[in-house]
Image (cartoon, rainbow, N blue to C red):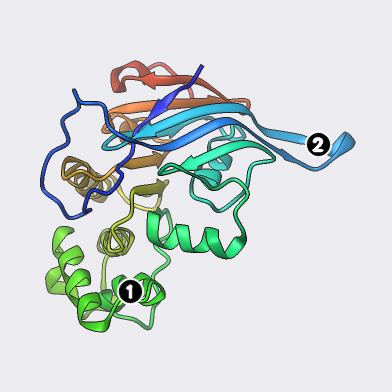
Amino acid sequence: MHNTLNSQASVHPLATAVIDSSVHHPIIIQLENISKVYGTGNTEVKALNSVNLTVEQGEYCSIMGASGSGKSTAMNIIGCLDRPTSGNYYLDGVDVSDLEDDDLAGIRNLKIGFVFQQFHLLPQLTALENVMLPMVYAGIPGDERRDRAMAALKRVGLENRQSNKPNQLSGGQQQRVAIARAIVNRPVLLLADEPTGALDSHTTAEVMDIFTELNRGGITVVMVTHEPEVARLTHRIVLFRDGEVVQSHLAPEEIAHIQFN
C-alpha cells in the first residue's frame, strides 16, 4: 500500500496563490519499495525496508522517528544525495534511481531546494551573493541572478540585509538566507533537515512562520525534525520506525503521546 506526502510540480516558489487542498495535485515524490542496505554478511544493516511513500504538490509534511528509524536515510534518497539499494524513486515523474552522478547533481540544483540545521553559507560572500550562488551553477545570466536573489531575500524579509556577510547576521537571519537560497532556483520541492535544530524557541517560531508562508504560496515542503512542537506546525506527519513507514498520515494533534527519542 502506498503512503502519501505532497509536492509542488512547476509552481513558482515566490508565487502567492494558495493551493486548494481539496483538489488532487501532481505527485512529485514517489518511493516504490525502496530499500537501503549498508554492509554485507554479518555487518549488513537494512536502513530502509521496502518503503512506499508519495508526496503531492503543495503539501507541508514532517518526517519523524527515533534515531536509527530510517528517516535521515529516506531524506537523503529523496534529496538525491544517496541511492537506494533496490526499488524505484520517481521525482517529478522521472525515475532517478539509477541516474549518473552528474545527472543527480543537476537535479539537486534545479529541482530540489535544501535547508539544513547548519546554514552552510559561505562566510566570504554577502547574503545576496550566497543566494545567487545556485544560479551561477545553473547558468542563469547575471542580471537575472541579482533580480531573483533580491526577490527571494524579500520573500524571507531580508532585503535590507543583502550586503551583510554571515558573521553580521543572527542565526535566524542566516537560516532565512539559506531558505532564500533554497527557493531561488524555483525547485519543485523544498527539503528541510532539522532546520530549527540550531535555533532558540523564539527564532524557531520565526523560521517556521516563513516555511508556513512559503507553503501557503504553493511551495511543497518536506521537513525532517525530532521536535514535536515543530512537527505540529506542519499539516501531516510521517512516522518512521525500524526502516519502515508505520504511520503516513498522522495529524499534528496525534503526536502528543508518541516518543521519538
Q: Work out whether residue 45 or residue 166 is closer to the camera in this orientation and state it.
A: 45
**SS at mark 1 in the image:** helix
Q: Work out whether residue 78 or residue 116 is closer to the camera in this orientation and state it.
A: 78
Question: What's the residue at 43%, 30% (across, down)?
Answer: 54
Left or right: 90, with 99 as reference point: left
Question: What's the residue at 15%, 30% (across, down)?
Answer: 20
Q: What is the spatial separation of the Cα atoms under label 2 and label 1, in whole angstroms?
A: 40 Å
Residue 9 position (above or below residue 137): above
Residue 229 position (above or below residue 38): above
The tag on residue 130 is: 1
What amino acid is found at the position of numbered circle 1 in the picture?
A: Asn
Q: x, y percentage for residue 192? A: 39, 48
Q: x, y percentage for residue 183? A: 29, 58
What amino acid is found at the position of numbered circle 2 in the picture?
A: Glu
Question: What's the residue at 88%, 36% (across, down)?
Answer: 41
The tag on residue 104 is: none
- Earlier sequence position, callout 2 versus callout 1: 2
Q: x, y percentage for residue 257? A: 40, 16
Question: What's the residue at 13%, 70% (across, down)?
Answer: 159
